[in-house]
Image: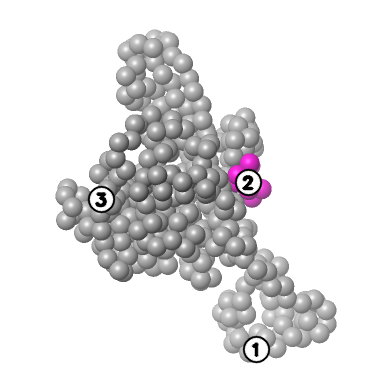
Amino acid sequence: MNEKEAAIVELIRRNPYLSQQEMAESLGISRPALANLISGLMRRGVIRGRAYILAEENRVVAIGGANLDRKFHLKARAQAGTSNPASVTASVGGVARNVAENIGRMGHPVSLLTVAGNDSDWFQIEQETAGHVDLSHAALLPEKTTGSYSAVLDPDGEMVVAMADMDVYEDLTPQYIDTHAPLLINAALAVVDLNCPKETVAHIKELTRRSGKELAIVPVSSPKMDRMPDDLEGVTWLICNRDEAEAYTGIQVEDESSWKKAVRLLLEKGAENAVVTAGAKGVMAGNADGIRHYPAISGVRVEDVTGAGDAFVSGVLHGHLSGFGFDDKIRCGLVNAAKTLASGATVRTELSEEQLKTEMEELQ
């Protein structure tokens, strides 16, 4: 093989899903010249043919965090410098993981791309997640520890202090994403949370944009909004809360007018659909057809707020994948969030496509 042919073979070995145009641009030659070189390689048996792989219908790929969350419930007021009696509960979490499990329970095939330690925390995450989510692409790093979030709560349930160990997610690199590029390219929808580094978020956005795939971005906190891409071209859904929207847009959301203004700016930055949530005040959501306010479901008995935001995101994306109209997509999210608030579970175990359908009919 000559130098150009060897370069072609190496490109195909690294990513067999590249188009001829992408290979030609990478090699600095014309597409017809590349086609001639590929034809020669096929005649000589170096390349044995081209596979056409169909995307799995409604396959979702979630990229980001999978944590073990611990809550220490103090039995008396916190006292510094001494041992405090407490009980502890542990549950699996992480925005990408929570969204993936919700979506999986609603009947969509879903894979999770994440990194974790090869430790007992990951084993618990795997045990509670694998029934609904494909975890075969997760990278286990023996020298790292699985992401964790630990909160100390006083007897009234108010937070005293919280600790987050999320260093492992720095290994969610563009190189890791490239290893799984075929999975992303053949998915119906990619969902990325901002546990990923900024360069990884930008890389995923470019990869899905080039391949014509849909992308949802889900922030995890306002401090991590600096990981957002500089523009939102190619983003199908951006779903964030009020604090996160304020951090990204610079607009203080103080009333309905400023709330709508924040959504409008997200759309102007390139998002196809934008949603800004505000808890009990509902959500402001829109696209090119307009922006409107959707009230939260009323009369909800709140058991635990953990996971409600991820349930909302998942409901919206379920509605999107199911081909619902815009209003019904948002309503899917609101109903799933309300039922999760009342359940006490991060992801409610009774959730299914039929269950959510019944709940939406009951809450008409």
Residue located at (61% from left, 86% from top): 31
Q: Position of residue 267 (x, y in %)?
A: 31, 64
Above or below residue 90? Residue 75 is above
Could you give the CA–CA distance between mark 1 and mark 3, rounded to whole angstroms? 50 Å
Q: Which disc is residue 323 wearing?
A: none
First of labels 1, 3 by sequence position: 1
Q: Which disc is residue 33 wearing?
A: 1
| Residue 228 in sight | no
Of badges 1 and 2, the one in the foreground is 2
Could you give the CA–CA distance between mark 3 and mark 2, rounded to whole angstroms? 34 Å
Above or below residue 214? Residue 103 is above
Residue tagged 3: 246
Q: Quadrant of residue 127?
A: top right
The answer to whether residue 60 is left or right of residue 236 is right
Residue located at (30% from left, 36% from top): 299
Image quadrant where one finds the N terminus: bottom right
| Residue 208 in sight | yes
Q: Say if the magenta span includes residue 146.
A: no
Residue tagged 2: 135
First of labels 3, 2 by sequence position: 2
- Per the image, label 3 sits on a secondary structure element best described as helix
Residue located at (47% from left, 63% from top): 323
Callout 3 amino acid:
Glu
Of badges 1 and 3, the one in the foreground is 3
- Per the image, label 1 sits on a secondary structure element best described as helix
First of labels 1, 2 by sequence position: 1
The answer to whether residue 281 is left or right of residue 345 is left
Check contact, mark 3 vs mark 2: CB within 8 A: no
